[in-house]
Image (cartoon, helix red, strand yellow):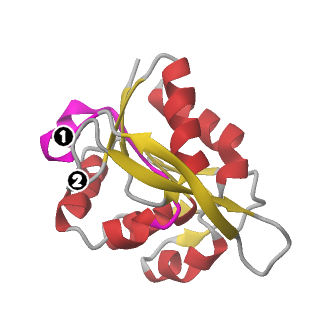
Amino acid sequence: MAKVLIIAGDFVEDYELMVPFQALQMLGHRVDVVCPEKLKGEQIKTAIHDFEGDQTYTEKVGHNFTLNHSFHTVHSTQYDALLIPGGRAPEYLRLNPEVIILVQAFYQDNKPIAAICHGAQLLTAANIIEGQQISAYPACQPEVVLAGATYVALEMDQAVTSGQFVTAPAWPAHPAWLAQFNQQLA
């Protein structure tokens, strides 16, 4: 089975971290979750984003998530694939040069990369999606287009695969997104 790395941070979207973490393990994959400047055993805070009929999503406090690996010890060669959840974490993680280098290494090694919601912000900051078809939360469309990709507007429960990338707009897409990502891991 595959070894998957998840890069997360405080106020990552709760469902977009916890569901893939558990589902991929249930399928037999090894999954490590890391956060820059935090060590194995430390926690990050999550947020729950919901669609309640407003012009944008709402945000509520989520669960604390205990990291099972330390960021400073990981290298792309230790993993078969990368998964990037959304929420607010990608907004500031994309400012960390070490995170960008790590994301670029997965791309350069042609390994599967799954991103959901605002996770596309790390893909755009890493400058690795030119020419690809990428979905993300609709508010990320300008960044995706400026990075040279074609933004794919999907229903919230759909996902798209383009080359090594599997992307989706938000957590309602988990069944489609994770199924497509799992096919890339086979």
Instruction: Give the image quarter of residue 59.
Output: bottom right
User: Residue at the location (66% across, 51% down)?
Assistant: 171
* Residue 145 image label: none
Q: For the residue marked with disc 2, what is the amino acid?
A: Leu
Residue, x 73% and y 50% (percent of image)? 172
Magenta residues (range): 69-88
Where residue 28 appears, as percent x and y from the top left, is 48, 16
Circle 2 packing at 10 Å, graded few (<14), some (14-19), many (20+), is some
Task: State whether residue 88 appears in this view.
Answer: yes
Say whether residue 130 is visible. no
Please tell me which residue lies in front, 80 or 118. Answer: 118
The residue labelled by disc 2 is 102
How crowded pointer 1 is (Cα within 10 Å; few <14, some 14-19, many 20+) is rated as: some
SS state under label 1? loop
| 92 w.r.t. 26: above or below | below
Location of residue 30 in the rendering, given as x and y in whole percent from the top left corner? 38, 23
In front here: 142 or 91? Answer: 91
Q: Which residue is mark 1?
A: 74
Residue 26 forms part of the magenta stretch: no
Q: Is residue 130 left or right of residue 36?
A: right
The local secondary structure at tag 2 comes to helix
Q: Residue furthest right?
A: 53
Q: CA distance from mark 2 to mark 1?
A: 9 Å
> Label 1 sits on what residue type?
Val
Residue 113 is situated, as x and y percent measured from the top left of the image, at: 42, 47
Magenta-drawn stretch contains 79: yes
Q: Are marks 2 and 1 in contact (CB under 8 Å)?
A: yes
Vertical comparison of 178 with 134: above or below: above
Indicate the quadrant containing the N terminus: top left, top right, bottom left or bottom right.
top left
